[in-house]
Image (cartoon, rainbow, N blue to C red):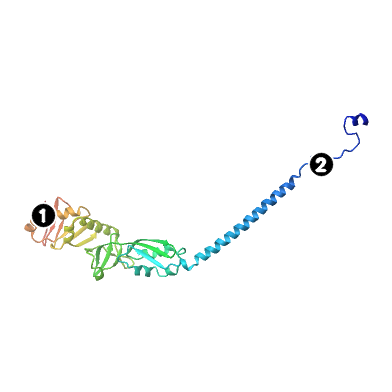
Amino acid sequence: MSRDHAARRGLPTPGVAMPADRRFHRADGSAGRRRRYGRLTTRLVRWGVVTLVVAGICAWLGTLVLHSELLRIRRLVVHGNAHLSTGDVESILDGIHRENLLQADLPAYRQRLLDSPWVADVRLSRVLPATLDITVVERVPMAVARQGDRLFLVDDDGVIIDDYGPEYAQFDLPVVDGLLVASKAGAPAVPAERARLADDLLTALGARPDLRKRVSQIDVSNAHDAVVLFDDDPAWLHLGDARFVERLQNYIDLRPRLIERFRDIDYVDLRFDERVYLRGPAKTVAARH
C-alpha cells in the first residue's frame, strides 16, 4: 500500500513514528500500594501512641488508688461471734489495719481465724472504701470430756475447743468419759468414732429432755457401746450404738421389778432388747421383759 493511499484512509504512514496518546497510560500500582501502606502505618502509630498513653494513665491511677490512704482498712465488722469476742478476732487478725483493702490477702487472714478452736467457719468480705466484714460460725460445745483430772470442751466433730473452767459454767453439758485418748504428740485427741457415738446419743436424748436431765455421766470408751449413769441410780446402763431412748425407757419400765428381785445392781446390759442382762455384786443374771 502506498503512503498516499494509507494517508487517505487515516492509517499511519509506514515508517513514520506516531506520538504516544497520554490518555491510555497504565496506572502505576506500586505507588498506590505505597500510599495505602503509608496511611495504614500512620493510623497504627497514632493508635499505638493513644494506647500507650491510656495504659500509662491507667497504671498511674491504679498505683495511686492502691496506695491511697482511703483504702487502708480502718474498720472490722464482726458478726456471729458469741464466745470469741470482737477483740479476740482483731487480735487474731493483727496487722490487717495496715493493709490496703484491695490488696489484703484475705485467704491467709481467714486461715488465721480458722486456726482458732472456737471457729468452725468464717467468711471475709471487702466493703469499700475501708471496711472488712467478718461473719464467724462458732463451734457448739457438745460435752465436757474428762481425761484424768482434766476437763475439756468438745464439739460434735470431736474438736477440743478449750479447757473447761468456771468461765464455761453456763453450758449445761454432760461429762463424757472415754472420749479422749493420748495422741502421739502427747496432747489429747478425740477418735472420730467415739465422737460420733457421743453425738448420736446426745442428739437422741435431746428429743427426751426428761431423760436428758437424769443422765449424769456417759462413757464411750467402747465406740460401739454407749454407757450412761442416771443421777438417782448407781447402775451403769449399756445401750449399744442405737435405739438409745427406747432402751432407756425399757429400763425405766423394768426398774421397779429389777430392784425388787435383785436389789443391788452394778450394771444393766440393754443391748439385746428382748433379754436384759444384769450384774450384781456376786453374779450376772438374765431377765426377760
Task: Confirm or deny contact between disc 1 and disc 2 (CB under 8 A).
Answer: no
Instruction: Describe residue 23's horizontal placement relative to residue 73 as left or right.
Output: right
- Along the line of sight, the residue nearer the viewer: 163 or 271: 163
Residue 38 image position (x, y, % from top left): 70, 52
- Along the line of sight, the residue nearer the viewer: 254 or 66: 66
Q: Mark 1 points at which residue?
A: 254
Residue in the image at 47% along x and 68% along y:
69
Q: Mark 2 points at which residue?
A: 22
Q: In which quarter of the view is residue 228 placed?
A: bottom left
- Along the line of sight, the residue nearer the viewer: 91 or 66: 66
Q: Which mark is residue 40?
A: none
Secondary structure of the residue carrying tag 1 is helix
Instruction: Describe residue 177's horizontal placement relative to residue 63 as left or right.
Output: left
| Image quarter of the N terminus | top right
Looking at this rendering, what residue extends furthest in the left direction? 260
Q: Which amino acid does label 2 sit on?
A: Arg
